Image: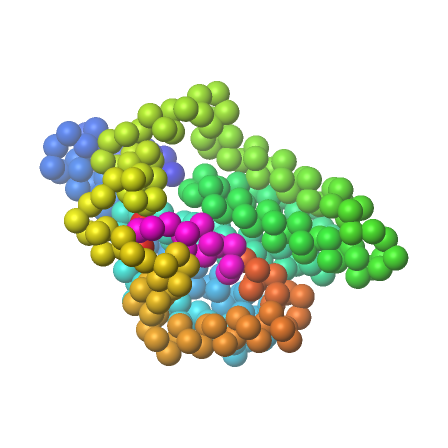
């Protein structure tokens, strides 16, 4: 996406050097990347509104969009040269499609959800956990329409497998090395490489800023030490209350959102290092 944006912008703006070898060239690349990150994060606001409207109406949608627009964590991530905004945008858009599939089957929504999950996985592989949410949505939908059927049969429903195939196809199309040369990922051993990030995240490699996390309790420490800093203690506590209410007394769509919250947090919460 960054390379394509630079290819489009360069002839329009008269940029000759896109190699990043000079300070001016690096500045142009960084500014372009930050504009893309800010655009993705800005698009997340109407998507959040849409999701809130689909669940509980326009008032809740407006309140949810306001929280995203004003939360310190979202604002901080919106303009850095990072991928969190893209992941959130793809995940929320895919979640909208999944909620629609929980009500009725639609080939176009299945295809769109699969592609969005694949796009999210190209950003971070953890977005593939949305496939579990989609499968649960389809299984419960089919069970509701035919309660006498077994739990196994809906797992073979075409909606699940078409979405899975499209997600995998999208991921491989964007990152073909995962299929033809998967070990390449583990060869990225530089300070910004995937291998280094994994080793710092699980505590194999220690850094001065990770020593504080040596005695952390997985999940709990990440929640207490991370979420309140991003949105504040009132919203962090309110989230727990609302999540529990949605799980116990909410509709199927609310429970699917609650399931995604858990699946999204688990891989991060199990890491030793909170900063990762």
Seen at 53% across and 41% down, the residue is: 118
Seen at 50% across and 76% down, the residue is: 241
Rendering coords of residue 230 (x, y %): 32, 66
Seen at 28% across and 60% down, the residue is: 76
Residue sitting at the far front: 215
Seen at 63% across and 73% down, the residue is: 248
115 shown above or below 95: above
Q: Viewer-proximal residue, 19 or 122? A: 122
Q: Quadrant of residue 42?
A: bottom left
Rendering coords of residue 205 (x, y %): 25, 40
Majority SS type along the magenta span: helix
Q: Quadrant of residue 32?
A: top left
Asked if residue 188 shows in the view, the reply is yes
- Looking at the rendered image, the quarter that the N terminus falls into is top left
7 shown above or below 60: above
Residue sitting at the far right: 148
Horizontally, residue 37 falls left or right of residue 130, namely left
Q: Quadrant of residue 259?
A: bottom right
Rendering coords of residue 226 (x, y %): 33, 63
Asked if residue 36 shows in the view, the reply is no
Number of labels in the image equals 0
Rendering coords of residue 115 (x, y %): 56, 42
Horizontally, residue 58 falls left or right of residue 185, namely right
65 shown above or below 202: below
Residue sitting at the far left: 23
Residue sitting at the far top: 180
User: Range of the magenta residues?
Assistant: 261-273
Q: Viewer-proximal residue, 39 or 11? A: 39
Q: Is residue 266 magenta?
A: yes
Q: Is residue 105 magenta?
A: no
């Amino acid at each position: 996406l960054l390379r394509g944006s630079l290819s489009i912008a360069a002839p329009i703006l008269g940029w000759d050097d896109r190699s990043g070898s000079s300070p001016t060239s690096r500045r142009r690349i960084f500014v372009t990347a930050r504009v893309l990150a800010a655009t993705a994060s800005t698009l997340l606001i109407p998507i959040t509104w849409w999701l809130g409207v689909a669940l509980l109406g326009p008032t809740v949608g407006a309140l949810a969009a306001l929280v995203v627009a004003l939360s310190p964590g979202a604002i901080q991530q919106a303009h850095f040269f990072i991928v969190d905004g893209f992941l959130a945008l793809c995940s929320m858009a895919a979640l909208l499609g999944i909620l629609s599939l929980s009500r009725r089957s639609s080939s176009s929504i299945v295809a769109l959800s699969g592609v969005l999950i694949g796009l999210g996985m190209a950003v971070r592989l953890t977005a593939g956990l949305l496939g579990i949410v989609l499968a649960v949505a389809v299984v419960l939908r089919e069970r509701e329409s035919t309660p006498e059927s077994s739990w196994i049969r809906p797992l073979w429903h075409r909606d699940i497998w078409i979405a899975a195939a499209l997600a995998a196809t999208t991921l491989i199309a964007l990152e073909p090395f995962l299929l033809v040369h998967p070990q390449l990922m583990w060869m990225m051993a530089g300070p910004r490489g995937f291998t280094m990030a994994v080793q710092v995240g699980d505590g194999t490699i220690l850094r001065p800023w990770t020593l504080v996390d040596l005695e952390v309790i997985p999940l709990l420490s990440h929640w207490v030490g991370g979420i309140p800093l991003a949105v504040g203690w009132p919203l962090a506590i309110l989230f727990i209350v609302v999540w529990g209410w949605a799980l116990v007394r909410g509709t199927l769509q609310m429970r699917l959102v609650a399931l995604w919250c858990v699946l999204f947090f688990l891989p991060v919460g199990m890491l030793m290092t909170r900063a990762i």
